[in-house]
Image: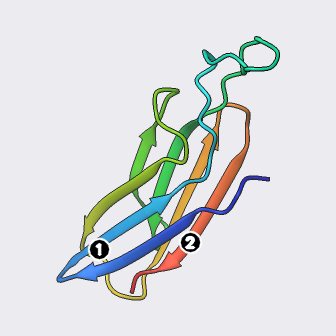
Amino acid sequence: MAEPMRIRATMSGDVADIKVLMNHPMETGQRKDAKTGQLVPAHFIQDVTATINGATVLSANLGSGVSKNPYLGFKVKGPKAGDKVVVNWTDNKGDKNTAETAIA
């Protein structure tokens, strides 16, 4: 099971500012283990989706070039305080994680 994500969503005028910290090793598959000398298998987030009240507002495809514990910030015009934000990711090994919050 993946570690929980941290998510924060705040309103500024009519724009929601959403920030997500995704805990993930994000291995490229090109790094060698210091003890064994073997390549560490690739393990990275591939797909990220964000919804507000069930409507998709962000869909992204990531790759192995993104750093460990990626941070994603984006702004959405139109939602209201109290609306539900849900962020999901899936990695190349099939692991999944979900976080949700209400816009403050």
Residue at x-position 66% and y-position 30%? 43
Q: Please state which amino acid type lies under the numbered disc 2.
A: Glu
Q: Earlier in the sequence, mark 2 or mark 1?
A: 1
Image marks 2 and 1: residues in contact by CB distance under 8 Å = no
Horizontally, is 34 left or right of 59 in the view? right
User: Gap in Å between the C-alphas at discs 2 and 1?
Assistant: 14 Å
Task: Using the image as rendered, state which of residue 17 and residue 70 is in the foreground.
Answer: 70
Residue 24 lies, with reference to residue 78, above or below; the image says above
For numbered disc 2, what is the local secondary structure?
A: strand
Residue at x-position 54% and y-position 48%? 69
Locate residue 25, reporting x and y percent.
63, 40
Considering the image in quadrants, where does the C terminus appear?
Answer: bottom left
Q: Which mark is residue 66?
A: none
Residue sticking out furthest to the left: 13
Location of residue 13 by image quarter: bottom left
Locate residue 34, reporting x and y percent.
73, 20
For numbered disc 1, what is the local secondary structure?
A: strand
Residue 50 lies, with reference to residue 27, above or below; the image says below
Q: Please state which amino acid type lies under the numbered disc 1.
A: Ala
Residue at x-position 59% and y-position 62%? 5
- Which residue is identified by label 2? 100
Residue 38 lies, with reference to residue 2, above or below; the image says above
Horizontally, is 1 left or right of 98 in the view? right
Residue at x-position 72% and y-position 21%? 41
- Which residue is identified by label 1? 16
Location of residue 39 by image quarter: top right
Number of numbered discs overlaid on the protein picture: 2
Locate residue 6, reporting x and y percent.
55, 67
Task: Using the image as rendered, state which of residue 62 and residue 68 is in the foreground.
Answer: 68
Locate residue 80, reporting x and y percent.
32, 84
Q: Residues within 10 Å of mark 1 (few under 14, many from 20)?
A: many
